[in-house]
Image: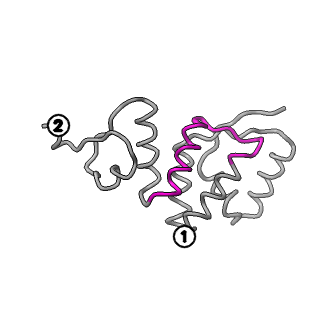
Amino acid sequence: MNKKMIVDTNILIRLFTKDDDTQIEQLVQLMEQGDIAFHVQSIVLIEAYWVLRKVYNFAKETILRVFEDFIEADEVELDEDGLVQRVLAQFRGVNVDLVDVYIAEKSKSLELSVLTWNAKDFRKLECEFYRPQDLI
C-alpha cells in the first residue's frame, strides 16, 4: 500500500537535519516499507528553507542540494513540480528571498503582474511587477 500524504514542514526538517533519531527511524521505516508517498506543497518547501536557513544556519547551497536530492526520490511528488524546479534553478543564481523567486515564477505561470514595494529584488527576477505608486 502506498498512501499519498501531504507532509508538514516538521517532517522535512527532521529528514534534513536528522536531529531526532527516533523520528528519523520512524520516517525511514515508513519510506522503506513503501507505506507512504510524500506530497509536498510549495509553501512547505519555502517554510522548510526558511527554518533550515534561519534556525539551523544551513548554507543556501547546502539546502538547495538537499532539496534537489529529496524531490528526485520516488516517494516524493510536488504539488507544482515544474514550477518548483524553475524556482530552485533560478534561486541558485540570485540573491533574493526564495519566496520572492516563487512569487515571480508563479506570476509568470499565471500571467499576472506582481504588486510589491520590493522593486530592488523583483528587478532581478524578470517578471512584470509594479509598485503601488507606479499605478496611481
Q: Residue at x 71, y 41 (%)?
A: 76
Residue 9 belongs to magenta span: no
Three-letter residue code for mark 1 = Asn
Looking at the rendering, the stretch of residues picked out in magenta corresponds to 71-94
Q: Quadrant of the C terminus?
A: top left
Kind of residue at badge 2 = Leu
Residue beneath disc 2: 135
Point 33% across, 35% down: residue: 113
> What residue would you read off at disc 1?
57
The mark closer to the camera, 2 or 1, is 2
Of the image marks 2 and 1, the number of the one nearer the N terminus: 1
x and y, in percent, of residue 16 in the image: 67, 59
87 magenta-colored: yes
From the viewer's perspective, is 89 left or right of 32? left
The image position of residue 55, as x and y in percent, is 52, 66
Q: Quadrant of residue 61?
A: bottom right
